[in-house]
Amino acid sequence: MLKNFFKFGKKKKGKEEQKSELENQLDKEIQESEDEIQKIKKETEKEIKKAADEILKKDNKISENSKVENGNVESKLDESNFEKREKTKKKPKLKPLKDRLATPKKGFFGKLKEALLGKTIDDDLYEELEELLIQSDIGMNMTMQLVEELEKSVSRKKLKTSEQIYDELKELLKAKLVYSDESNTKLKLQDGKLNILLIVGVNGVGKTTSIGKIAKKLKDSGKKVIIGAGDTFRAAAIEQVEEWGKRTGVEVIKQAHGSDPAAVIFDTVKTAKNRGFDVAILDTAGRLHNKRDLMKELEKINKIIREQSGETDFETLLVIDSTTGQNGLEQARIFNEIVDLTGIILTKFDGTAKGGIIFPITEELKKPIKFIGVGEGIEDLREFDTKEFVEAMFD
Ligand SMILES: Nc1nc2c(ncn2[C@@H]2O[C@H](COP(=O)(O)OP(=O)(O)OP(=O)(O)O)[C@@H](O)[C@H]2O)c(=O)[nH]1
């Protein structure tokens, strides 16, 4: 039994030895597998790193290449922009509307001085000049004309500095006011007879105010003055004229609101003639919505003046609000077509940086500027003096 036991023990031990051998074998194989896995892992990582490096290298190469390519594109763009710039250099770059409206105090000519003085004479300077001239309401045509004349003068007179250009421009502008020379800017008034001043212009331009200011001037110079409230269409216009009459101590002839303006003109001229007045200033209604009616009305008034005063040669002055710019020029054209203008009153010069309108108006109409309004006050009307005006505007 013991023998069997020992046999059994021997048998048992053999089995256990076998088992541990198997376990060892298994452990060994597991270890080997794990080593193999680690090896493969390391190799895979190496491969991945290598591949990643390759990709990075390629990327760098591409971006480097693209840098060069972009550089080429940029320089090509530069070239074409340059060409474009060259081609478009003559066109003025217009600034936004808000920049185009300069503060009245500074005025256009002050800006012009700022823009010109101390600058190099090049295309940019001419462009800036064009821009400023257009902003001042000199108008596109006259601007182009002026800049062309200026360029010609610069090359003909070999002008070198912007100061010289500035002075040259001043002279060119003065020349545009040729119709406003000393011989015709003064009112044509003769002693010992009735002088008529017929005042025309659309509503709101400053007709009544100008009439009041002129009445004051003439009265102060010793003339016997009478005013005819010919704008019967607006009740307020009659009251306004009356108010100016009171302020200046000048008699006013009026009729009821809505009555025939020709009748007021008739009364005024007749009274003036009969009572020996020196000057009759006649207000009119400037309704422009119907050119034919306006023409008929002004013809009728003209006929009455001629018949009543016996004068054919009298002043017909068109009042234009200088702040209305090109619109003012359009009004001037219309009135000039339908009535024989002898001069222009430009009002509200104090309130505008767009005084440039004076140049195309004078040149186109070929009529002198007689007065400029520079404020709402009774004294704020100046007799026009070209030289003084241009100097003052450039100052
Ligand atoms: N700043 C300034 N304002 C002026 C000037 N002349 C007239 N005004 C003002 O412009 C406005 C219109 O002037 P009016 O004289 O009433 O104009 P009007 O053409 O007679 O107008 P109606 O009576 O409506 O036909 C008024 O407020 C005036 O004070 C001027 O030279 N400068």
Image: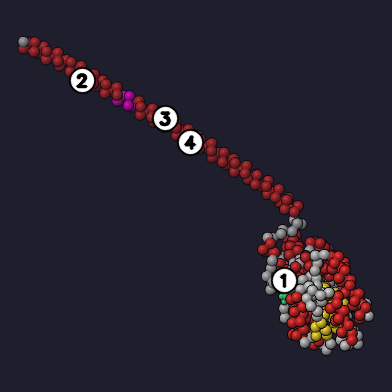
Which residue type does callout 2 highlight? Ser
Which residue type does callout 1 highlight? Thr
Give the mark nearer the N terminus: 2 vs 4. Answer: 2
Report the residue marked by disc 4: 53
SS assignment at label 4: helix
Report the residue marked by disc 1: 352
Q: Residues within 10 Å of mark 1 (few under 14, many from 20)?
A: many
Q: Residues within 10 Å of mark 4 (few under 14, many from 20)?
A: few
Q: Which mark is residue 20?
A: 2
Q: Residues within 10 Å of mark 3 (few under 14, many from 20)?
A: few
Q: Residues within 10 Å of mark 2 (few under 14, many from 20)?
A: few
Callout 4 touching callout 1 (CB < 8 Å): no
Give the mark nearer the N terminus: 4 vs 1. Answer: 4
The Cα–Cα distance between marks 2 and 3, rounded to whole angstroms, is 35 Å
The Cα–Cα distance between marks 1 and 3, rounded to whole angstroms, is 83 Å
Give the mark nearer the N terminus: 4 vs 3. Answer: 3
Seen at 35% across and 29% down, the residue is 38
Question: Quarter of the picture for ligand 1?
Answer: bottom right
Report the residue marked by disc 3: 44
Q: Is residue 342 left or right of residue 40?
A: right
Q: Quadrant of the C terminus?
A: bottom right
Residue 66, quarter of the rendered image: top right
Seen at 90% across and 76% down, the residue is 304
Q: Quadrant of the N terminus?
A: top left
Give the mark nearer the N terminus: 2 vs 3. Answer: 2
Q: Position of residue 353 (x, y in %)?
A: 72, 70
